[in-house]
Image: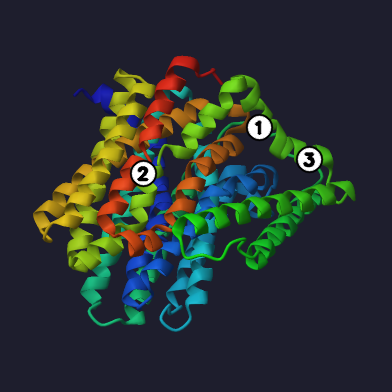
Amino acid sequence: MSLSYLSPLLNPNSLRMFFLGFAAGLPILLVFSTLSVWLFKAGVNRATITLFSWVGFAYSFKFIWTPIVDNLKLPILGNLGHRRSWLILSQLMIIFSLIFISFTDPKNSLIFTIIGAIFIAFSSATQDIVLDAFRIESAPKILQGALSSMYLTGYRIGMIVAGAGSLWIASFLGTEIYNQKVWQQVYQIMAILMLFGVITVFYSSEPKIKRDIEKKYNQKIKFFLAFLFSLAGFILCYSYFKDLINSNEPIINFVNEFIKIFFCFIIFFIILFLLIKIKFINQESVKSAYAKPVLDFLKRYGSKATSILLLIGLYRISDVVLGVMANVFYIEKGFSISEIATYSKFFGTIATIVGGIIGGIASIHLGVMRSLFIGALISALSNLLFAWLALITADVKILALVITADNIASGFAGATFIVYLSALTSIKFTATQYALFSSAMLFLPKLIAGYSGGFVNLFGYPTFFVLSAIIGVPVLFLIIWINKTVKINKR
């Protein structure tokens, strides 16, 4: 392989994107798999642990506050440039949130741990909004593959540090007997490592994109307050909304939750509508923030937009649903925390990086849609390996084999999917459209994943893993349909 072939990966923009990817990958496991081990060691029950996956709704709903990130110039920090200032703010929020959660103890005060996890997820989702836009705006389309590849590599290494690294630290400090001080030190070390992202932002240049930001500062403040009022209505509605049917059945609970969230969204938009009617915020501001990016996408794809959004919403469903239960499954199967750290969080993440590189190359030589199909197929098939692992005696070699295969599949699918989403995004509405796509990607999978613990309680691990593979099958037919009927329109 010649140096000229590698030069796009080694230019300063790509290298900076590597470190920013590291900062993006670090927080996510700290509110998912690493947190699930902490909760399990603290004695929190399985069903409650999987419900923590709903913290991930911050990533699913981030499109709601994306217009604020796009339209509000930050005081003082704003002098760094629009994207850079929001990156610094979100990274500092992550650091403070990690320090906050480190002082909580889920064994005695679970509610404070929940609050800390929500803060981390919200801050991390905000960072993702800015980074996705920053990446797409920082280079022409021809260099997007290189930036995406380096971003993903850094992202996965961040996940290694937050996954394997945090568990190794916890194992070294002692986790046989639950000790809150151990986890306090783990999360504080992760907070320090986030400084890599902060430093990288200061050595990065602001993208040279003309931004149509409202001139009136007062209107921006009102826009931000309107969002907070609407969000408060959403949270209150969710807190007091009673289930329509009382049942312990996972399917009934899923339907109840879907109706609850749908109704809460209605309340959110009613509050926003009323604030417009009383002229608290300007109607044109809302249209510019929310309607124009959506209308742009609908105009470019017309009747096929629904099919594209359906594919986005279902593509990673097998991965996400399985991933919530993976760490709890490993522990209950009898594997030690150090074994989980080594094979799942270290070698597994390296396998994901390898899968991502293969996926990127496949997207170039086979085309995006063919690569998407292969990624969806191998992701679903790899879940069946977990069903096999659940049925046999615990064996570290088989664990390594299953994890490696699953993570290569996940990395392949993830890389091709980022290329697909980037191609769909209009440069005029980079942050909002990409946030909408990535939010749609996570909403339904996270909703279903929240009930995975209850499902395992009823039916066991083998059935759960088989069904997690089956729910990925419709995606294959959807990709075939879209490949035949939809052509990606140039930005």
Answer with the quarter of the image where residue 151 lies.
Answer: top left
Mark pair 2, 1: CA separation: 29 Å
Q: Is residue 351 left or right of residue 111?
A: left
User: How far is the residue under mark 3 from the one under mark 2?
Assistant: 38 Å
User: Going from the N terminus, do you reach mark 2 or mark 1 first?
Assistant: 1
Residue found 29% across the figure and 52% down from its top: 463
Q: Label 2: which residue?
A: 318
- Whole-percent x, y for residue 143 in the image: 41, 26
Q: Is disc 3 in contact with disc 2, using a CB cutoff of under 8 Å?
A: no
Looking at the rendered structure, which numbered label has been put on residue 285?
A: 3
In-front residue for pair 70/35:
35
Farthest residue to the right: give it: 278
Where's residue 4, x and y in %? Answer: 27, 22
Could you say which disc has been placed on residue 369 in the image? none
- Please state, as top left, top right, bottom left or bottom right, where the C terminus lies in the image: top right
Residue placed under numbered mark 1 in the picture: 293
Quarter in which the N terminus is drawn: top left
Q: For residue 183, what is the image quadrant?
A: bottom left
| Whole-percent x, y for residue 456 in the image | 33, 60
- Residue pictured at 48% horizontal, 30% vertical: 422
| Foreground pick, 209 / 170 | 170
Q: Quick check: 267 above or below 485?
A: below
Residue type for callout 1? Pro
Q: Secondary structure at mark 2?
A: helix
Mark 3 vs 2, N-terminal side: 3
Q: Is residue 239 above or below residue 426?
A: below
Between tags 2 and 1, which lies in front? 2
Q: Say which element carries label 3.
A: helix
